[in-house]
Amino acid sequence: MTAEENRYDVIIAGSGLGGLLCGVLLAKEGMRVCILEQSGKAGGCLSTFHRKGIDFDTGVHYFGSMDPGQPLHHYWDYIGLAGSVPMERMNPDGFDVIGFEDREYPLAMGSDHFIECLHDCFPGEKKILEKYMDELEEIRKSFSLYNLELPAGDPEEQYRGKSAFDFYYTLSQEAVNPAFRSRILSVLSGNNLLYAGSRERTPLHIPALINHSFISSAWKPVGGSGSIVSSLLQKIRESGGEVHLDSEVTGIGSSPPLFTVRTRNGNHFRAKNFISAIHPARTLELLESPLFRKSTSARITGLRNTYSSFALYLVMKEHSFPYLDHNYYFHKDENVWDEAMEAGWPSGYMLTTQAPATEDGFAKSMVILSPIPYSLFSRWEKTTTGRRGEEYDAFKQEIAERLLDLVEKRFAGLRSGISFMEISTPLTWHDYTGTPEGSMYGIERDYNNPPVTNILPVTKVPGFYFTGQNINLHGVLGVTIGAVQTCGAIVGLDFLLKKIKGL
Ligand SMILES: Cc1cc2nc3c(=O)[nH]c(=O)nc-3n(C[C@H](O)[C@H](O)[C@H](O)COP(=O)(O)OP(=O)(O)OC[C@H]3O[C@@H](n4cnc5c(N)ncnc54)[C@H](O)[C@@H]3O)c2cc1C
């Protein structure tokens, strides 16, 4: 490559949702964009893998707020994804069902309907449900970018310092029927695999913004989340951007005003702006000179990560399992928090059948996810996929059987309907996305210390930015808003928001 050929306006490390969205947003502004991805496939958690004729979703099973007028729809409409990604609206009477051994509870779409449906399960407790929805609405209004407004500071900050568990707990204590107290608490936070929450640290705004977005409207990708990746890649390339696969970033050098980014395959790329769309701790390991203060680096590398997951990807025999238009979350007991424990694993799981259904309403495939601690697999950390050894394979199989045993208690006969099974462990995520400890959602936010656990898109190094699930929030909506924050820092947030709003 000549010096001119490898010179860009912005280099982005990582082609997950965060990196790809920044690529589209900046390429749309006429910037020369170059995305470097370590894997041979773009998309990170958005990628699918193909087995026995099925595209399996790995890290995106559903997303919220996609009705016209809702935040994700606004952002994706501007990006050009709203009409180009096949998706299916989930069951309005229960997009998530929260199950315990004795009973199941639907989480319905639309505030009033959500309240009505849970009120049927908890007669006399309407006040609690109304208070819950009012608080979610209040929090959503306080986070400006969820309303396509410029951040106003204080209202957002106050929620970052509030405990989610305390909020749920205090609310549940208002139950008129004392028998409902712990059950209301566990049902309202029953899909907490969505935010991998620990009761000691999770800030209130995380479950609030995520649950609000799904209650607004919940959608499944049809045919796999890979269509989101293809659509974003096409838009980047149409605007003159480049995406280099098999290009692991191994070094980031800075000689102002340029960054020089080196890849394992021996190439180097230069740009005035560098966006890291990979885990911040990994990013710091790649710096060729200490760009950040020692205290900043120590803070970031010392942060705790959210827990990981164990997943079963199942191809089902014909007519063996009904297609579910909702996700099913099961909990062995009412402590739905901190389920990623070694003792007594598994404590719960999420089961989702993939769209589309067969014509006669059966599932072709499904994914079962369960929270799991990395420590169970860390002894194989230095091994690579396919070469971890017989002991690992046997352990993985044993763990899978334990999970299937639990699932069969609710879905009797499920095993006999399986025609093929693939398993992923925390090591799969660790190797595949480069996330420390195979963490699902990256850095764990802590309401006890918000400034320390919040990574900002803008850094003290001019031209050096972060994006992806470690800033703002994880998940499709959280990462989309994070990409707008990062790109807004480069081209002007006010300017970008006006364009998104069509002003
Ligand atoms: C099991 C699971 C289920 C989930 N389910 C949902 C869901 O149903 N709905 C939802 O909204 N969200 C879900 N999420 C969360 C969501 O998928 C993520 O928050 C989001 O996709 C993260 O995007 P990202 O761009 O920040 O990171 P990633 O997708 O992790 O992308 C990072 C990219 O950087 C690349 N990379 C890393 N190191 C380097 C390097 N040195 N050089 C070059 N490239 C590098 C990686 O290969 C990867 O492609 C789920 C996540 C998991 C793990």
Image (cartoon, grey):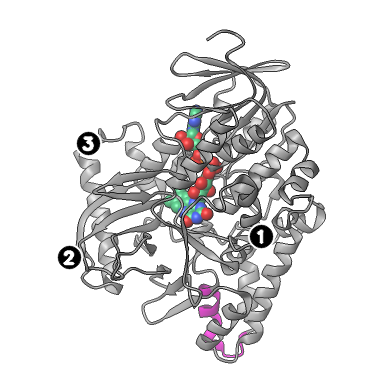
Q: What predominant SS class does the magenta segment belong to?
A: helix
Q: Nearer the viewer, mark 1 or mark 3?
A: 1
Instruction: Estimate the spatial distance between the alpha carbons at disc 1 and disc 2, rounded to whole Å.
Output: 42 Å
Span of residues in magenta: 175-187
The magenta stretch spans residue 241: no
Spatial distance from mark 2 to mark 3, Cα to Cα? 28 Å
Query: Label 2 sits on what residue type?
Result: Ser
Q: Amino acid at mark 1?
A: His
Q: Which residue matches tag 2? A: 416
Q: Return the disc, 1 or 3, that comes first in the chain's sequence.
A: 1
Judging by the rendered image, the residue that carries numbered circle 1 is 205
Q: Which of the two residues, 441 or 180, is positioned nearer the viewer here?
A: 441
Please give the residue where the numbered disc 3 appears in the rendered image: 389
- The residue type indicated by label 3 comes to Gly
Residue 138 placement, left or right of 435 = right
* Disc 2 to disc 3: CB gap under 8 Å: no
Element type where label 1 sits in the image: helix
